[in-house]
Image (tube, grey):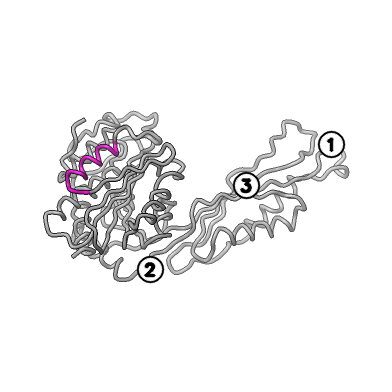
Amino acid sequence: MTIANPASVLSMAQALIRCASVTPADAGALGVLETALTSLGFTVTRLDFGTTPNLFARIGNAGPHFCFAGHTDVVPPGHGAWRHDPFGGVVEDGVLYGRGACDMKGGIAAFVAAAADRLTRPLDGSISLLITGDEEGPATDGTVKVLGWMQEHGQIPDFCLVGEPTNPRYLGEIVKIGRRGSVNFTLTVHGIQGHAAYPHLADNPVHRLVAILQALTAAPRDAASAWFEPTTLQITSVDVGNPATNVIPASATAKINMRFNDRHDSAGLAAWMRTVAAKYAERFDLGVEVSGESFLTEPGPAVDKLKRAIERATGHVPKLDTGGGTSDARFISRYCPVAEFGLVGQTMHKTDESVTLADLEALTRAYVGILDEFIP
């Protein structure tokens, strides 16, 4: 494979797209990145945890230390008919096509091109990249493990920018300064199995579970907070697994997802769920799986630097936002201030994922400007 010219955002994006790095495969993507960064003078450390490939690269030893974070893994191309090979990196009419073009190999290419530009001038500080191959997958051996290594080795940055595609419609529309938390509950209510014609000899767990779910969904959990929407609760599955029509089952299970704002944490919500369940069921089990806690990088001087650079590059003053799902920023927020800004996300995970060359160039200019703001 031809290694991209690190100063060319298009060449770099094409080289990355041509690696079919569908989670958990790397397919050479981190090798492409390592070669490009090494040629720019970065010290590159490969950090493989379990079967997950990761990379940390840094140039400079002093502060301020600014870090770009992202992922080279992508979702499968799917079964739809693509205009071009999803791993071909084809350009047509000013548009680059390929899986990962906007989520987020295009963003990583802009990281590298911006660093190459910034390094043409004296650097009184440090630039680093934290890149994982495990963001679209379980996210257990990726960014979260690299951050632990970074802390052990004194590599935690002063500020981190994640290059997820944050813009719904046009480049420069939104900077994410936080994310809601997400927690999944598996609630299993236990009863006494019996004949449907003799309910007095049984204890129907389905009735108890329905009452619990009604109580959980009866009223909003809270109002919106200053930077977040109200907490939401969604029942995603109700299962009994009962093939018979005349048998009261022994247990019934529901799965529940909550997206929560900064008024809560996952432990508090789990305690609330147990309290509600106990009102209607004597015997139940509650499984708790936390995807991430809510976090917020408070608006202030650092966020203002992002906004200024983005406005200069795009002509738009970005809105500060905390919506959407989770990202690896939820891990980074435990260590340092973090925000997210990348490409337009309209085609992410879709057939014919793409990015305009104009947006790739503008994003690179924005990243150069951000580096200038943080490392004058």
Instruction: Characterize the magenta stretch by its predominant secondary structure.
Output: helix
Residue 195 bears which disc, if any?
A: 1
Kindly identify which residue carries mark 2.
298
- Classify mark 3: residues with Cα within 10 Å, few (<14), some (14-19) or many (20+): some
When asked about the image quadrant of residue 36, the answer is: top left
Given the image, on which type of amino acid does mark 2 rest? Answer: Glu
Going 38% across and 56% down the picture, which residue do you hit? 151
Residue 290 point in image, percent of width and height: 53, 52
**Mark 2 or mark 1, earlier in chain:** 1
Going 38% across and 68% down the picture, which residue do you hit? 298
- Classify mark 1: residues with Cα within 10 Å, few (<14), some (14-19) or many (20+): some
Q: Nearer the viewer, mark 2 or mark 1?
A: 2
- Classify mark 2: residues with Cα within 10 Å, few (<14), some (14-19) or many (20+): some
Distance (Cα) linking label 2 and label 3: 33 Å
**In the rendered structure, does residue 123 fall within the stretch colored magenta?**
no
Distance (Cα) linking label 3 and label 1: 26 Å
Residue 186 bears which disc, if any?
A: 3
Q: Are marks 2 and 3 in contact (CB under 8 Å)?
A: no
Quarter of the figure that contains the N terminus: top left
Going 43% across and 58% down the picture, which residue do you hit? 179
From this view, report whether residue 248 is shown above or below residue 164: above
Given the image, on which type of amino acid does mark 3 rest? Answer: Thr
Q: Nearer the viewer, mark 3 or mark 1?
A: 3
Q: Is residue 251 left or right of residue 353?
A: right
Query: Residue lying farthest bottom?
Result: 300
Q: Which residues are drawn in magenta?
A: 29-42
Given the image, on which type of amino acid does mark 1 rest? Answer: His
From this view, report whether residue 214 is shown above or below residue 11: below
